[in-house]
Amino acid sequence: MTNLLFLCSRNRLRSPTAERVFADWPGVETASASLSHRERA
């Protein structure tokens, strides 16, 4: 199993999109996260 973590500044668009794109790949587990300490609105 390969684990992929996608990061972007606020976890609003880029990293969640990448997480969804790769989520259906066989043998790949994905997650996304923010680099900011601010809460999501």
Image (cartoon, rainbow, N blue to C red):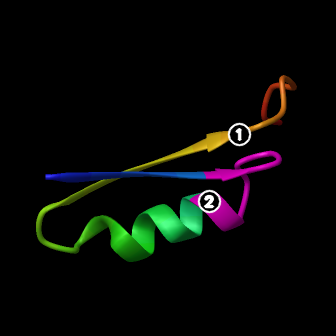
C-alpha gap between disc 2 and disc 1? 8 Å
| Residue 2 included in the magenta stretch of the image | no
Would you identify the image quadrant in which residue 4 lies? bottom left
- SS under mark 1: strand
Viewer-proximal residue among 18 and 1: 1
- Disc 1: CA contacts within 10 A as few (<14), some (14-19) or many (>=20): some
Q: Position of residue 11 (x, y in %)?
A: 70, 48
The reply to whether discs 2 and 1 touch (Cβ–Cβ < 8 Å) is yes
Question: Residues in magenta?
Answer: 7-15
- Tell me what residue is drawn at x 52 percent, y 69 percent: 18
Residue depicted at x 12% and y 71%: 26
- In the image, residue 12 sits, relative to residue 14, either above or below, namely above
Identified at 65% across, 50% down, the residue is: 7
User: Residue 15: which numbered mark, if any?
Assistant: 2
Percent x, y of residue 6:
55, 54
Residue 13 appears at what percent x and percent y? Answer: 71, 64
Residue at numbered disc 1: 34
Q: In this orientation, which residue lies closer to the viewer: 28 or 24?
A: 28
- Residue type at tag 1: Ser
Rendering coords of residue 21 (x, y %):
42, 76
* Secondary structure at numbered mark 2: helix
Lateral position of residue 8 relative to residue 9, left or right: left
The three-letter code of the residue at mark 2 reads Ser
Q: How many marks?
A: 2
Identify the residue at image location x=84%, y=33%: 36
